[in-house]
Image (cartoon, rainbow, N blue to C red):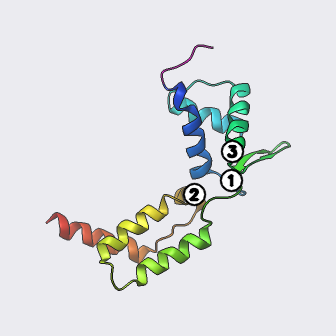
Amino acid sequence: MGRTENQKLKLLYLKELFERQSDEEHLLSMQDILDALAARGIRAERKSVYDDILCLQQFGMDIVTVKGRHGGYFLASRTFELPELKLLVDAVQSSKFLSERKSMQLIAKLETLAREPAAAGHSLRTRQDHERERLLFRRSAA
């Protein structure tokens, strides 16, 4: 198979895919992985993806393989688990020396460390936080 222009980015895209879209409840099948790479313009074969996953594991990523009919792959541990991130968000929100705008910026950065909320079914921020952020950005834009 010929190499595509984005081929050198494949490992980085795989790392991001595991960090943002997988956990023990959301396994990635080989077809999910191939489709995600194809969406980024990378053609890959199963064998090369197996090698890439092994490479990421050797690098230190805790990627678990679940065998069987409904098996797949997922990232088992992260730098921060969801309860730890929620604790950090609470600390940022209750901080008296940070402006609301700076708090929202820090919370947005913390959210990048969690699995995507749309896939996970939860967010680090509450609906009230999102509304406050909208108001802050409207005020700053005016």
Check residue 28 in the rendering and tell me which mark sits there, or answer none: 3
Q: Amino acid at mark 1?
A: His
Residue that mark 2 sits on: 115
| Quarter where residue 120 is shown | bottom right
Quadrant (top left/top right/bottom left/bottom right) for the C terminus: bottom left
The kind of secondary structure element at disc 3 is: loop
Above or below 36: residue 136: below
The first of marks 1 and 2 along the sequence is 1
Amino acid carrying mark 2 in the image: Arg
Q: Main secondary structure of the magenta part?
A: loop
- Quick check: is 3 in the magenta stretch? yes
Give the left or right position of residue 104, taking residue 50 as reference: left
Is residue 85 or residue 135 the one in the foreground? 85
Tags 1 and 2 touching, CB below 8 Å: yes
Tags 3 and 1 in contact by the CB under 8 Å rule? yes
Position in image of residue 140 (x %, y %): 19, 67
The residue under the point 32% across, 71% down is 102
In the image, the segment drawn in magenta is: 1-5
